[in-house]
Amino acid sequence: MQGPALQLLEDDVRELIRRRRLDPARDEVEVRSLIGEVLDDYDDRALIGGLVPLTDRGEAQRLLVEAVAGFGPLQAYLDDPTVEEIWINEPSKVFVARHGRSELTPTFLTEQQVHDLVERMLRSSGRRVDLSSPFVDAALPDGSRLHVTIPDITRRHWAVNIRKFVVAADDLSDLVRLGSLTEHAARFLEAAVVAGLNVLVAGGTQAGKTTLLNCLAAAIPPHERVVTCEEVFELKVNLRDVASMQCRQPSLEGTGEIPLRRLVKEALRMRPGRIIVGEVRQEESLDLLIALNSGLPGMATVHANSAREAVTKMCTLPLLAGPNVSSSFVVPTVAASVDLVVHLGLEPDGQRRVREIVALPGRVEGEVVEIADLFVRRDGRLVRAEGYPPHEERFVRAGYDLRALLGSA
């Protein structure tokens, strides 16, 4: 439809929203009804003359809903189930990712449109971005994760990234169906979670770490109390007794910040049966290790290019907690606290697959944590290796025969 007509309609809709004191994010039904009224009025005036008739009323209604209740030109990509991620390098360069591959879209925005979209996206989270806080992480109402960086951190334009929460899998059986995991490995991982082993999920960006963590969490026995700690809410743990916490940015005065390390400490005071940390990046890894070493089962994700690198990273990140933390304490604590590492990656064909599952038997040799291969990928398939996980007695208590569960290599 014509640009001037659409702008006139949008102005009318926004004016009525202000008069009726509606919130487009919450009063969606009322806003859609209001848009219908505006379109009816426009059609009546077009019949009398002086206004260009609408060529496609349905398209006009869709564009108006996107403009006032959605996220404008980006809404179509947010609604598209094949789009995994959206990012804006500059107003004329809007990209999306499908099946792990990036595409430059034909969408052109103005600088003001980008700013307005970001402001609208941040409204529901209560977070902000300005010169004093040039970065922001926030969750959109649908669970997608928003990250924004503004000048002078960026060269000229606002850099916007939206990582969509695409629900492709709810449990380990879904990952088997999608080809990310074999049924044999899935049965073992489910048993390991039920038995209370501590699991570290490792991989690169967009490898599917959060999805796998959600699927592992689905195997947690329903009677357990779970406490989750995240930078921004991303985990979807569908259990009866779950307490979820996210970090908080500092105020304009620079006060009130709640970092992830504080959340991990507070989680231990909330009677957890199990703790889940969305991603360990800094000194909060020390508090997580101490919690796991005290007998509290838990899971977390970490950025790493292999299971071995994930273990190495867990041995070095806690050193950021302070000069009084030494590797002579951290390394054996990692060996004793982390039981399994599941490493997955994004393949060239866009498929996310588990590449290896390793166990930590608890032994250290020359400040190097020993690992044992449980499942490795050979000839494109995840197959059983020769290693065995620790704590066979936990599997027995949970009603599993570990030898029968794993089988021979």
Image (cartoon, grey):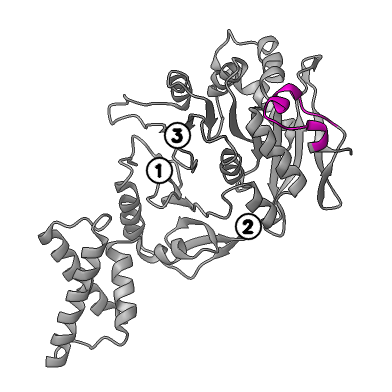
Residue 396 among magenta residues:
yes
Give how far apart the Cα atoms at labels 2 and 1 are.
Answer: 22 Å
Residue 68 among magenta residues:
no
Residue named by callout 3: 242
- Magenta residues span 387-404
Q: Residues within 10 Å of mark 1 (few under 14, many from 20)?
A: many
Identify the disc placed on residue 138: 1
Give how far apart the Cα atoms at labels 3 and 2 are.
Answer: 32 Å
The outermost residue toward the bottom is 48
- Image point 64% across, 33% down: which residue? 193
Mark 1 or 3: in front is 3
Mark 1 falls on what kind of element? Answer: strand
Mark 3 falls on what kind of element? Answer: strand
Identify the disc placed on residue 100: 2
Taking the image as shown, residue 382 lies to the left or right of residue 56, namely right
- Image point 57% across, 64% down: which residue? 103
